[in-house]
Amino acid sequence: MQQLDILNIKLDALLKKYAALQAENKSLKDTVARQLQQIDTLNEKAGRLEEDRHVADIGKVVADNTDKAGVRKQIDSLIGEIDKILITLND
């Protein structure tokens, strides 16, 4: 009978430990899920920031090249118009 009582005590201790471990496991899984969600959110944010930076870099390059190319086109166009006017004046 004494062995049965000892076995019951050990079984109760194991069941309590098992319940505690289950609770801890659930808590850890919840923590991991929250952290994974945060990682996903931060990765999305980092991706958006990277895209914004690329767009800004491209915009800067395009603006610089567009300004130069645009000014050159305007000057060429004005020179062409001046040449036409000079030709008509000489006729």
Image (cartoon, rainbow, N blue to C red):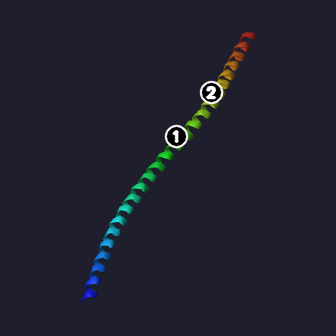
- The residue pinned by badge 1 equals 52
Q: Is residue 10 left or right of residue 81?
A: left
**Quadrant hosting residue 13:** bottom left
- The residue pinned by badge 2 equals 67
Q: Is residue 3 left or right of residue 48?
A: left
Question: Which mark lies nearer to you, 2 or 1?
Answer: 1
Look at the image and tell me in which quarter the C terminus lies: top right
Give the class, few, some or many, for how many residues have Cα within 10 Å of label 1's Cα (few <14, many ≥20).
few
Q: Amino acid at mark 1?
A: Asp
Q: Amino acid at mark 2?
A: Asp
User: At 69% from the left edge and 15% from the top edge, which residue is drawn?
Assistant: 82
Residue 69, percent across and down?
66, 28
Choose the circle earlier in sequence order: 2 or 1.
1
Q: Which labelled disc corresponds to residue 39?
A: none
**Quadrant hosting residue 53:** top right
Dot 2 falls on a residue whose secondary structure is: helix
Residue 48, percent across and down?
49, 44
Q: Is residue 24 above or below residue 6?
A: above
Q: Is residue 64 left or right of residue 86?
A: left
Residue 49, percent across and down?
51, 42
Q: Nearer the viewer, residue 66 or 50?
A: 50
Dot 1 falls on a residue whose secondary structure is: helix
Which residue ends up furthest to the front in the rendered image?
2
